[in-house]
Image (cartoon, coloured by chain):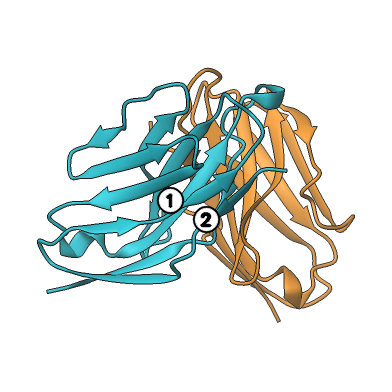
Amino acid sequence: AQTVTQSQPEMSVQEAETVTLSCTYDTSESDYYLFWYKQPPSRQMILVIRQEAYKQQNATENRFSVNFQKAAKSFSLKISDSQLGDAAMYFCAYSDPLGGATNKLIFGTGTLLAVQP
Amino acid sequence: DAGVIQSPRHEVTEMGQEVTLRCKPISGHDYLFWYRQTMMRGLELLIYFNNNVPIDDSGMPEDRFSAKMPNASFSTLKIQPSEPRDSAVYFCASSLWGDTEAFFGQGTRLTVV
């Protein structure tokens, strides 16, 4: 079975600095998708960034980028120029097209990010 | 579109009572998912539907839980009878076949006392 592991329960970063959140996963599939979701105190789940496993190029969305290492099954999130609004719980998630639903998500346990002014 | 709409946002009920959570997916989406979030187990998939048909309910914890999708614009998750350990945030999400993004509702925080 596929699993997602986030080994950092909590992280802290100074405003305007850079922080990297770690995620590893396990799967025997070759075709899959990886995601980072943000959950602020409002509890809304917000998609931050996604990566398709067959694409070697790392995804980037403004200040957010990933380091996708397929062989190592690692998928870290880098937040540059951290802002107070980035403070939230971040979840790494996995899905694969098996069964046809590419959005059947398996989540990690989350990393709570604090941003210090 | 207003996004995925869940109701109620908060629900407090007594043990043994029936609880019904509601979800309206984004119009046109053909997949609907129910997730549960707890401190102990994190976010876990309970059940998902494709074109109103339940596809995988292996995540439903017990027979006390049931879900229906009578039409493309409405789904319910029912717990009968409810127990304190059912206290959690329940999320509904919808997506379109071929699109990798799932859109989440704001969740229903259920407290069973």
Name the residue at 40% across, 56% down: A22
Q: At numbered mark 2, what does the secondary structure look like: helix, strand or loop?
A: loop
On the rendered structure, is A25 left or right of B60? left
**Residue B112 % position (x, y):** 70, 75
User: Dividing the picture into quarters, in which one does residue A60 lie?
Assistant: top left
Name the residue at 18% across, 58% down: A18
On the rendered structure, is A30 left or right of B101? right
Q: Is residue A45 above or below residue A66?
A: below
The chain whose colour is orange is B
Q: Is residue A101 above or below residue B63?
A: above
Give the numbered dot on residue B39. Answer: none
Give the numbered dot on residue A45. Answer: 1
The chain whose colour is cyan is A
**Residue B103 % position (x, y):** 46, 38
Q: At numbered mark 1, what does the secondary structure look like: helix, strand or loop?
A: loop
Inspect the image, locate mark 1, and give the three-letter code of the amino acid beneath it.
Met
Q: Tell me the CA gap for discs 1 and 2.
A: 9 Å
Tally the numbered discs.
2
Inspect the image, locate mark 2, and give the three-letter code of the amino acid beneath it.
Gly
Is there one chain holding both mark 1 and mark 2? no
Give the numbered dot on residue B107. Answer: 2
Q: Is residue A3 above or below residue A62?
A: below
- Categorize mark 1 by other alpha carbons within 10 Å: few (<14), some (14-19), many (20+): many
Name the residue at 12% across, 66% down: A15
Q: Nearer the viewer, residue A10 or B74?
A: A10
Q: Nearer the viewer, residue A113 or B7?
A: A113
**Residue B31 % position (x, y):** 61, 28
Q: Is residue A39 visible?
A: yes
